[in-house]
Image (cartoon, rainbow, N blue to C red):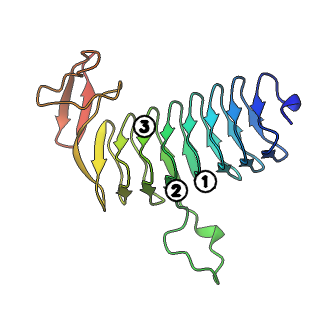
């Protein structure tokens, strides 16, 4: 399979359907399935038992851990991290007996966002750049950039830096020293 893609690793137990684009350096591990009309950027890693698509766009430098399904309507921008067994939905009120494919709601996970293990992202709610969703959290509304979200339903309990450091009251990254400021109570900006 990987012989069809230059500088891409696809484990022999995985399937890639037709009309899929995969960037150089990307690795697709055991028992995964990439459905038709998907785009995956460069240097991304899809763990074991990952299902993508159809019609999904995944950026470059994305890491998707084991047992994650990225359904139609979800876009993962560059640098997104999806922890093990995190969940994306695509319909708000699913019923097995009722076909609702025309009701899929779009969800965009913006650049650099991190989603913890077993977190659930309810469709139709975008996640802002470099936000951090704690393990087990349930996202039921829009998430601001840099927000640290936890709980069920999730609420903002703080702010995170681009480098993944929890910001204190001084809003300075403890990892690399970048300073931030509050533009308003729900909007954090990097000071440039």
- Frontmost residue, 109 versus 70: 70
The dot on residue 105 is none
The structure residue drawn at horizontal position 64% and vertical position 84%, both measured from the top left corner, is: 97
Q: Quadrant of residue 180?
A: top left
Label 2: which residue? 88
- At mark 2, the secondary structure is strand
Q: CA distance from mark 2 to mark 1?
A: 7 Å
**The C terminus lies in quadrant:** top left
- Frontmost residue, 113 versus 46: 46
Q: Is residue 90 above or below residue 188?
A: below
Where's residue 45, x and y in %? 62, 33
Dot 2 and dot 1 residues touching (CB under 8 Å):
yes
- At mark 3, the secondary structure is loop
Where's residue 46, x and y in %? 63, 39
Nearest to N terminus: mark 3 or mark 2: 2
Give the number of marks: 3
Q: CA distance from mark 1 to mark 3?
A: 17 Å
Where's residue 96, x and y in %? 62, 80
Circle 1 or circle 3, nearest the eye: 1
Nearest to N terminus: mark 2 or mark 1: 1
Where's residue 61, x and y in %? 57, 28
The 10 Å Cα crowd at callout 2, few under 14, some 14 to 19, many 20 or more, is many
- At mark 1, the secondary structure is strand
Nearest to N terminus: mark 1 or mark 3: 1
The structure residue drawn at horizontal position 82% and vertical position 40%, both measured from the top left corner, is: 12
The dot on residue 69 is 1
The 10 Å Cα crowd at callout 1, few under 14, some 14 to 19, many 20 or more, is many
- Frontmost residue, 35 versus 180: 35
- Frontmost residue, 56 versus 151: 151
Label 3: which residue? 113
């Amino acid at each position: 399979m990987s012989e069809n893609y230059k500088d891409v690793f696809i484990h022999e137990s995985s399937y890639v359907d037709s009309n899929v684009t995969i960037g150089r350096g990307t690795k697709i591990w055991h028992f995964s399935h990439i459905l038709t009309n998907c785009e995956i950027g460069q240097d991304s890693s899809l763990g074991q038992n990952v299902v993508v698509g159809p019609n999904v766009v995944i950026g470059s430098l994305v890491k998707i851990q084991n047992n994650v399904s990225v359904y139609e309507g979800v876009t993962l921008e560059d640098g997104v991290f999806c922890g093990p067994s995190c969940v994306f939905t695509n319909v708000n009120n699913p019923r097995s007996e009722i076909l609702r494919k025309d009701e899929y709601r779009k969800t965009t996970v913006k650049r650099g966002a991190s989603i913890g293990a077993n977190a659930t992202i309810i469709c139709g709610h975008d996640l802002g750049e470099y936000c951090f969703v704690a393990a087990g959290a349930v996202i039921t509304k829009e998430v601001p950039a840099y927000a640290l979200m936890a709980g069920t339903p999730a609420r903002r309990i703080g702010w995170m830096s681009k480098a993944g450091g929890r910001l204190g009251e001084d809003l300075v990254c403890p990892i690399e020293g970048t300073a931030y400021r509050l533009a308003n109570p729900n909007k954090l900006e990097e000071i440039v």
